[in-house]
Amino acid sequence: MLSRTANGLFWMSRSVERMENVARLLDAGRRMESLPQPDGAKATEWGSIVIASGCRTTFPAPLDTASRANVPLHLAFDDTNPSAIRSCARAARENARAMRTALTSELWDAVNLTWTDIRHRDPHETLQGRAFTDFLDWVKSRGALIRGQIDATLLRDEGYAFIELGKWIERADATARLLDVKYHVLLPHSSDVGGGLDYLQWLQLLRAANSATAYRHLYRRNIDPEGVIDLLVRNPRSPRSLATGTQGICGALGAIGAHTAAQRATHTHAQTLRDQTAGTRVADIINQGLHEWLTDFIGALNTLAIEIGDAYGFDGHTVEPTEAVAE
């Protein structure tokens, strides 16, 4: 397959997945904002969403002014932000158009109509009240529709494998960033860990990941950090876990094949990341620090994506990693 075709399919897939995952981050911010704030506590949920999204350098205001008024606008409709939902929809459409002959008409229609709809939406009307929630649900449903057309209509060839590769890299990155939101939404006192607010924050994070029902089915206990980390990091039965994502990356690379030393090296690195993710105990993650462990994972995943792009001759660069709030 030509590297130009691989690049277009890979980034079409990543753009669709990122569009949906930014909507999930915004949903997490919306849910966190609705929780009661203890006396004297400073709301940090919208700043945490900016950091976790990797958009701190594109955010047009000081981070301590991040709020419901400016963060959704920047992450949904700001055309200067390449990770904004509308920018992702445009990028997906442009890559799909360039690779039109590699797509089915059903898939092209799903991608094209998503862009057509979002380009005509008024940002201020869309982000108000109930319309904001409806918009986030619509974005997630469009992502599901596009993936459904991919699964239902495309041949299982190298092109499909590059689409899968883009999806799994982006999803693993997004799940790590979503989990890291909990680090940045700090509790006012360490004694509050394990309390009611802590429980509600973990619950809203699970809901934003569409994983609250899965948690109840798999663990059958109250929500706690150990269970959430196990579900979204190590559990291969979760479609959004890091273990599932890294396994998907290895599967896609295996379908593409390795014909050069650089390509074989990327396969080895992907397998190492998969084994480290699935083999790490929850207790070890907590002892290292969830934020620190996630930062290491995101860095390793971004490095792997760049190596894959170099090995197969296309652009594998990603958004900036998450980072701690400056003191």
Image (cartoon, rainbow, N blue to C red):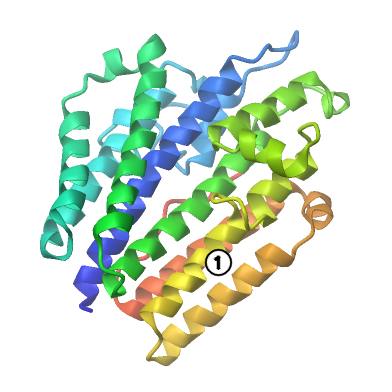
**In the picture, which quadrant includes the C terminus?**
top right
Amino acid type for the residue under numbered disc 1: Gln
Residue 223 horizontal side relative to residue 139, left or right: right
Q: Is residue 259 above or below residue 61?
A: below
At 35% from the left and 54% from the top, the residue drawn is 14
Residue 320 horizontal side relative to residue 283, left or right: left
Of residues 57 and 216, the one nearer the viewer is 216
Q: Is residue 244 above or below residue 268?
A: above
Q: Residue 74's x, y, as percent?
A: 36, 29
Name the residue carrying label 1.
247
Q: Residue 176's x, y, as percent?
A: 58, 49
Residue 162 horizontal side relative to residue 116, left or right: right
How many tags in the picture?
1
At 31% from the left and 38% from the top, the residue drawn is 142
At 50% from the left and 20% from the top, the residue drawn is 65
- Find numbered disc 1 in the image and state the secondary structure of the residue it sits on: helix
Mark 1 crowdedness (10 Å alpha carbons): few <14, some 14-19, many ≥20: many
Determine if residue 326 is in view: no
> Residue 271 sits in which quadrant?
bottom right
Q: Residue furthest right?
A: 191
**In the picture, which quadrant includes the N terminus?**
bottom left
Q: Is residue 247 above or below residue 67?
A: below
At 41% from the left and 33% from the top, the residue drawn is 59
Determine if residue 305 is in view: yes
Residue 197 horizontal side relative to residue 313, left or right: right
Q: Residue 58's x, y, as percent?
A: 38, 38
Q: Residue 17's x, y, as percent?
A: 38, 48
